[in-house]
């Protein structure tokens, strides 16, 4: 996904448009309410979840395979008081050691993950 013009320059803006809005903000806040400390967010996208993390979150390792998404996320990261390390790589190839993982299903469609069709349907 990181190579084509569509995926780098069109898809991030479409994702930003369709995944943002007041109707989804309440869901994001509720889903992230109990998070704290260090967070690993796979499928960080354009950073739409970032403003909804509670003050208890100190560090986010943000992972997304699409460099176009990271480009749009940079503005939110710069405004945030949370320390964010942004990784442009697949969630299947994480370089960091994960001690505890809580999975939060916060609006992460298979298209964003770019997993194989077979895996998404399982």
Image (cartoon, rainbow, N blue to C red):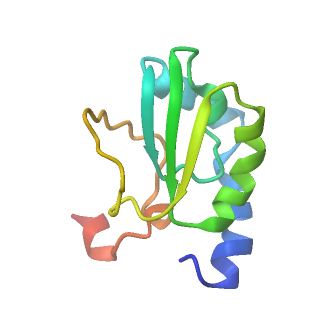
Q: Is residue 13 left or right of residue 59?
A: right
Name the foreground residue: 87 vs 43. 87
Percent position of residue 98, x then y = 28, 41
Which image quadrant: the C terminus? Answer: bottom left
Q: Residue furthest left?
A: 122
**Which residue is at 49% across, 53% downward?**
63
Q: Residue furthest front?
A: 96
Q: Is residue 70 left or right of residue 13?
A: left
Name the foreground residue: 19 vs 43. 43
**Which residue is at 71% across, 33% downward?**
22
Quarter holding residue 115: bottom left
In the image, residue 88 above or below residue 34: below
In the image, residue 22 above or below residue 93: above
Percent position of residue 76, x then y = 73, 40
Q: Residue furthest bottom?
A: 4
Percent position of residue 10, x then y = 73, 72
Percent position of residue 71, x then y = 72, 59
In the image, residue 99 above or below residue 89: above
**Which residue is at 70% across, 40% downward?**
77
**Which residue is at 56% across, 44% downward?**
85
Quarter holding residue 2: bottom right
């Amino acid at each position: 996904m990181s190579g084509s013009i569509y995926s780098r320059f069109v898809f991030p803006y479409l994702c930003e448009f369709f995944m943002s809005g007041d109707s989804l903000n309440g869901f994001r806040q509720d889903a992230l309410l109990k998070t704290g400390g260090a967070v690993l967010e796979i499928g960080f996208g354009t950073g739409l979840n970032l403003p909804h993390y509670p003050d208890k979150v100190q560090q986010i390792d943000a992972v997304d395979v699409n460099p176009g998404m990271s480009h749009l996320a940079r503005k939110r990261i710069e405004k945030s008081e949370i320390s964010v390390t942004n990784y442009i790589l697949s969630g299947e190839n994480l370089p960091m050691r994960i001690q505890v993982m809580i999975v939060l299903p916060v609006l992460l469609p298979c298209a964003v993950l770019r997993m194989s069709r077979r895996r998404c349907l399982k």
